[in-house]
Amino acid sequence: MEALEGLLRPGPFLYLLIAWGVVTAIFLVLVIWRSVLTSHEDDQIFLDAAEEHMAKEQRALVSKINKLSSPILTSGIMAGVLLLAIAGFFVYNGLKNF
């Protein structure tokens, strides 16, 4: 238990935890936002010329969903890398104090 208390003192491990929490929160918000947008997307719509505004709305929605893919991928990779760094730091500190 003392080793864990030592890790949570202000220092690199605590800063890694905070950065991981922030990046993971951003990742989750982006994934939730994409799922909300996707729920409004229609798989197939049959429109005539009078309903062109609905087609424009669907194209805009698909464009927004596609724009979110890059930030979602980036934040997910960052969260994973930070989690691996935290695990490596934790193992290193545990072996050092062994």
Image: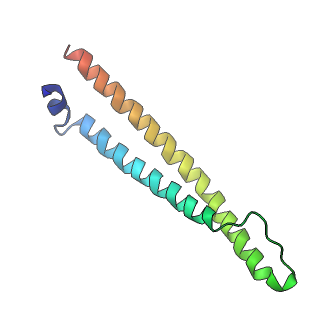
Residue at point 40%, 37% (across, down): 82
Q: Position of residue 3 (x, y in %)?
A: 17, 26
Residue at 45%, 35% (x, y): give it. 81
- Specify the quadrant of the image occupied by residue 61: bottom right
Identify the coloring: rainbow
Furthest-top residue in this view: 98
Residue extending farthest bottom? 50
Give the number of marks: 0
Q: Quadrant of the N terminus?
A: top left
| Residue 76: x %, y % from top left | 50, 44
86 or 33, nearer to the observer: 33
Q: Is residue 4 shown left or right of residue 74?
A: left
Relative to 57, 45 lies left or right: right
Q: Quadrant of the C terminus?
A: top left
Estimate the x, y position of residue 69 in percent, counting from the top left: 61, 53
Q: Quadrant of residue 60?
A: bottom right
Rendered image quadrant of residue 19: top left
Residue at 19% x, 17% y: name it.
97
Q: Is residue 49 above or below residue 4?
A: below
Q: Is residue 89 left or right of residue 83?
A: left
Left or right of 60? Residue 37 is left
Viewer-closest of 77 and 55: 55
Looking at the image, the residue that sits furthest to the right is 49
In terms of depth relative to the viewer, which is nearer, 42 or 31?
42
Give the residue drawn at x 73%, y 69%.
Answer: 59
Instruction: Please state the horizontal and vertical placement of residue 44, each as a whole percent of the image.
Output: 78, 66
